[in-house]
Image (tube, grey):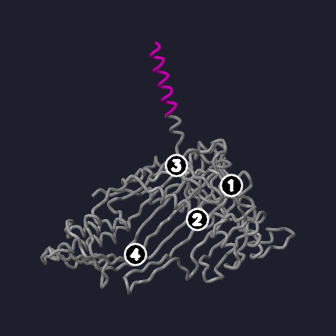
Amino acid sequence: MKKALNLRLCATLLLGLLASGLHAQQRTWKLTDAQTGSPVIFATIRTGAQSGTISNEEGAFNLDPGQAKTGIQISCMGYRTLTLTSQELENAPETLQMTPAAIALNEVRVGEAIPSAETVISRARARLEQNYALGTASFRVFYRQSEAMAFDRLDLELEKASDLNREALKAADARLRRLGQDLVKSQAREYLDLNGMLQIHADTLGALRISRATALVDHNRDYSPEQIQQRAQEIILDHLDTTQTYKVKTGIFKIEDSVSVADEFLEQEDASRDSSDFGMLRHSHKELLRLAGWQGNHLNRLLDADWYRYAFLGATYFDGNYVYAIAFSPRRHKAKFSGTLYVDAASYAVLKMDYAYAEGREGEKVNLKLLLGIKYAENLYRGTVIYRRNMEGKYAPYFIQREQGNYIYLHRGLKFIENSAAGRKVAFDFLMEGGVRTHQNLLVQPMESEAGNPFEGYTEPKQIYVRQLDRFAPSVWQDPEVMAPLEEMRQFRVEKP
């Protein structure tokens, strides 16, 4: 009898768990403009005072309706706030429309003169310290990075190899050229998603703690600059004697007199494929926070009238408040950006900034194409920063997005001359032209004060484990406080060779 009761109890518990599991189903919604049908990107979806998520670049967001017990509030600059109860959310269609909220300037300040763009910026700059948080605070974070290298041209050529006859040289050269053609056609892209916590101290990164890291990677099409170097190195090793040393020349320049193949080219023991350098990830987080920090050069410089010109674009609503939209463009030659600042009409806090390289502006560049066969230019840099008011009435970064790109041209001939009586020679020619595109998103949300200090006694590691997937797995993206995966992430699948 007791056994039967225990079995019945287990069955009841199991059914309860299954029922709760069925209820806890995430759904995906897409936000669109009610007038144009275009996606509403980077909209804030609040499920509580300090919790929620943000729509991605396609206007999509994920949420479990059962977890939004008090409903949700959706806010986006330029749109009227959309509020849904939990029941309305349960029954809502997959597409939610948001209504634009442009307003006439004379509605902004009844009975008061509309301030000029320069006045708005001056007041925003004067209130930086008053509006933005200082001190030390801990935050929950979600970070996404996608990276791709697109080749316009990649020519790899084996010009000479003393150990090969004419036919063998022709076959080896054809193999090298095919590699170049495969690289050009690859169009590979990788995604990395991280969950964790970070500590901000005095407007900059104090510490980073990563709890989960997941990557979508196609190792068969991993053509990053590091992988290109590795594959080219493997081809070179096919024709070099690892017991010998070599003179190395490029054009008329001698690079080395005595290069040891064993020391320089043989693969060294390295970190696992399933690990990632923590220092690089920490640097990425620090750089993104620097873009949003009011003490750093970026926001301070954009609010500097000596560097930029300003023009009044109009006004809009955000969370029921009036907001001024101010365009900025370079005044000085060294000023690089143009874009829009959205400034709260009451506090004069910058709530959002969109920026990009101004026309004719670029980042760092090197042009030694004629002398050394090298050209490099940072030709894409744009992003968005959104701030949100916290419980103390201060504004802190909520979402930071940055996209970077560059142009690379490299044309180098390499000749290896064996330091032996035979003096065997191997000559290669490499021509690469293309660019790298990196896209980063950082979602920052305050932690509950009762959570204590998650960084007490914590030491940052040198490497972190990254779970690498060769296809999209919906269960991995079930966390309600991450950005919804992009459609091309959902379609990610590595074709088996």
Separation of marks 2 and 4 at Cα, in angstroms: 34 Å
Q: In the image, which residues are magenta?
A: 1-17
User: What is the secondary structure assignment of the residue under circle 3?
Assistant: loop
Q: Is residue 4 rendered magenta in the image?
A: yes
Which residue in the structure is indicated by mark 3? 459
Residue at image point 29% right, 61% down = 267
Do labels 2 and 4 touch, CB within 8 Å? Answer: no
Comparing labels 3 and 2, the label whose residue is closer to the camera: 3
Q: Quadrant of residue 54?
A: bottom right
Q: Earlier in the sequence, mark 1 or mark 3?
A: 1
Of residues 9 and 289, the one nearer the viewer is: 289
In this picture, is 9 found above or below 361?
above
Q: Earlier in the sequence, mark 1 or mark 2?
A: 2
Mark 4 residue type: Gly
Mark 2 residue type: Gly
User: What is the secondary structure assignment of the residue under circle 4?
Assistant: strand
Mark 3 residue type: Thr
Which residue in the structure is indicated by mark 1? 135
**Neighbours of disc 1 within 10 Å: few (<14), some (14-19), many (20+):** few
Which residue in the structure is indicated by mark 4? 434
Residue at image point 79% right, 68% down = 108
Q: Earlier in the sequence, mark 3 or mark 2?
A: 2
In this picture, is 346 found above or below 477?
below
Q: Earlier in the sequence, mark 3 or mark 4?
A: 4
Viewport quadrant of the C terminus: bottom left
Which residue in the structure is indicated by mark 2? 37
Residue 83, given in percent of the width and then of the height, sits at 68, 52
